[in-house]
Image (cartoon, grey):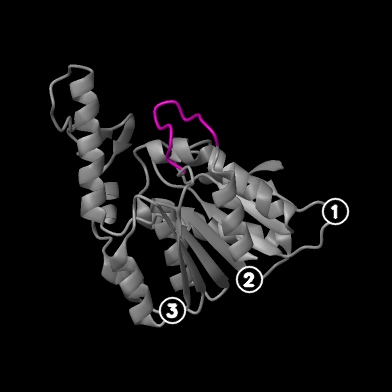
Amino acid sequence: MNLLFFGSASRQLFGAYHAPPASVSGRGAALLCPPWGQEHLVAHRVLRLMATRLSESGYHVLRFDYYGTGDSAGEREEGDLGTWQDDAEEALEELRDMSGFTSVATFGIRLGAVVAWRLALSRTDVHTAVLWDPVVHGTEYVRELSAAQAQTDRWLLLPVQRRNEPDGVQDVLGFPLSLSMRRTIEVIEPAMYSAPTPARVKLFFSAQQPQDSIRRALHASGTPVHVETIDNQLPWREEEESAGGPLPVRAVERMVEVLK
């Protein structure tokens, strides 16, 4: 694994590049798009496991942090889904340069799945998009975040309130949700997934989160799609309080198998 910074001098992004072993023939390239906030923390080990398994099977893999998140430059209040898309485009170009492959697969969890999907829509060099529990209803997702924060406040015996700062930033589970970020999330709706793409779509649901609306939208568009529910598997978001616990190895290996 090689750690690197890439992007422009004013917008430095952090990445982790996993090359396949010298003994394994190169099979392709895959870009891993992380989720946001608390979900990013919980998904970190799963994304690293996915990168490791993919590289062992012959894939060149790049994990990266959006601007203002993780180890990338920028403040946490900066950025939204629009600028994240620009970051993902930059990461995809970096992966193409490093791997030598001109066509790549994208993989994402939750909001990262939205980014991975939009890459497949906007570019002709994405041949496959693997989406794990993608956000389908943006307004619902924001309400869930607010409800989770309210529950935390009650548990800590704090007054339940929106806790907005003057600039419209809302504290959500220790992460600032800016007005710009909230607005770009709230426009996500099932119809977004009805746009056709030449990329193949691999759609995975955790057992407790089926989303019929996205399946209907994808099928209506004529997009080739593989849909699978992960039964009897530990979902990626398990152990949210400690970010610990066993990893869903079988689930990750199944996704690698489907991608291959």
Q: Residue 223: horizontal and vertical position, in percent?
A: 43, 79
Q: Where is mark 1, residue-wise?
A: 22
Task: State the predominant SS element of the stretch in magenta.
Answer: loop
Mark drawn on residue 76: none
Kindly state the secondary structure of the residue where label 2 is placed: loop
Q: Where is mark 3, residue-wise?
A: 223
- Tag 3: amino acid: Thr
Name the quarter where the C terminus is drawn: bottom right
- Tag 1: amino acid: Ala
Q: Which residue shows up at 18% across the image and 16% down it?
A: 157
Give the vertical position of 209 relative to 202 (above or below). above
Residue furthest out toward the top: 157
- Tag 2: amino acid: Ser
For the magenta stretch, what is the residue range?
A: 236-246
For discs 1 and 3, the disc positioned in front in the rendered view: 3
Q: Where is mark 2, residue-wise?
A: 103
Q: Residue 212: horizontal and vertical position, in percent?
A: 30, 66
Q: Is residue 107 visible?
A: yes
Name the quarter where the N terminus is drawn: top right
